[in-house]
Amino acid sequence: MLEPFELDAREEAVYLALVDAGSLTAAELGEDVLPLLGRLEAMGLIARLPGTPCQWCAIEPGIGFATLVELREQRVRRAEDDVRQARAAVQQLAERFRLRGDRHPLDLIDVAVGPEEVKRRAYQLERGARTQLRGIDMPPYLMTENDVELEMITGGVRSRWLYDRSVLDLPGKLDYIAAMREAGEEARVIIGAPFKMLIADEDQAMIALTDESRGTASALMVGPSILLDGLSRVFEGMWRFAVALQPTDPEPGADRPSEAESLLLAMLASGATDKTIARRMGIGLRTVQKRVQQLMERLEVDTRFQAGVSAKARGWL
């Protein structure tokens, strides 16, 4: 319970005994407790009571621990300041490095090998972003959650992700994407993603080379170069033609779809199968098929593709 205050097991036991009993003598607390009592007293957690034999009591915890809590808060603030200064220093060095002029080709690429190293470099890349993160997401995965991305979004970094359609069939993935979108991530779906990729600003990119299912995870790190410029254009090109996981709001006065129809349209446009849609919406497979047919009748079309075109024209997507 008291590990955050750097009390060992015996010191905690003595302190809790005083909290529970009100007051006790050293003899009642056990053998060799005087050094422990002296340390607890120096920390401001207990006090000696007048009288003989000497008794000890716990100071009201809200008062006794107040100073210790404040000291730890000061440490946290100093650590946060150190992190901000470290990031600023890295950015300054990176800018100085870019201004150096022509660089040796070997400076522009690097290979991270092993799952832990790949994860470490990915987190490092994300933390270095100043304005935007862009990525292509597809299985298999080394990381199930990305707290670093959430941290960067909270700090004002724009985050855009292209998800391969195959991820929609993974249990829990749609809920994860929905949570990330709620936090501020922009998400779209593509069919046949070429590879997993992460780009931080226009400074560096990371492309998956292999994964654990093939023996060893590895990734190519790409610095400022013609290759990085090309990867950026590849992402932007795919982004333009990708489908948003959720429809945008229709224009004022337009015929609006219901909430269920909006979700169904978004799932259809993203290429999700009826089985995936049923799981995401919490309904049966036959119900999905019936709702799709009803939606097509409302849009006065004969195919799902026509439904997407018609919905787009009406401002439903």
Image (cartoon, rainbow, N blue to C red):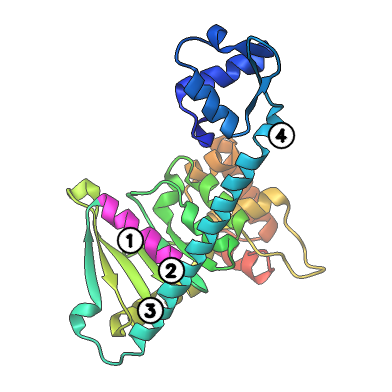
Please state the extent of the stretch shown in magenta in the rendering: 115-129
Asked if residue 52 shows in the view, the reply is yes
Q: Give the residue type at disc 1.
A: Arg
Instruction: List the residue tagged with mark 3.
Output: 94
Question: For the residue labelled by badge 1, is the local secondary structure a helix, a strand or a loop?
Answer: helix
Is residue 159 a member of the stretch shown in magenta? no
Nearer to me, 79 or 314: 79
Can you tell which quarter of the image residue 59 is in? Answer: top right
The answer to whether the residue labelled 2 contacts the one labelled 3, judged by CB atoms less than 8 Å apart, is yes
Image quadrant holding the C terminus, namely bottom right
The answer to whether the residue labelled 1 contacts the one labelled 3, judged by CB atoms less than 8 Å apart, is no
Asked if residue 303 shows in the view, the reply is no
Q: Residue at x 31, y 77 (%)?
A: 223
Image quadrant holding the N terminus, namely top right
Q: CA distance from mark 2 to mark 3?
A: 10 Å
Give the mark, 2 or 3, whose residue is nearer the N terminus: 3
Asked if residue 126 lies left or right of residue 178, the reply is left
Residue 189 image label: none
Give the mark, 4 or 3, whose residue is nearer the N terminus: 4
Q: Residue at x 71, y 17 (%)?
A: 50
Q: Residue at x 68, y 29 (%)?
A: 61
Instruction: List the residue tagged with mark 4.
Output: 63
Instruction: List the residue tagged with mark 1.
Output: 121
Asked if residue 68 lies left or right of residue 173, the reply is right
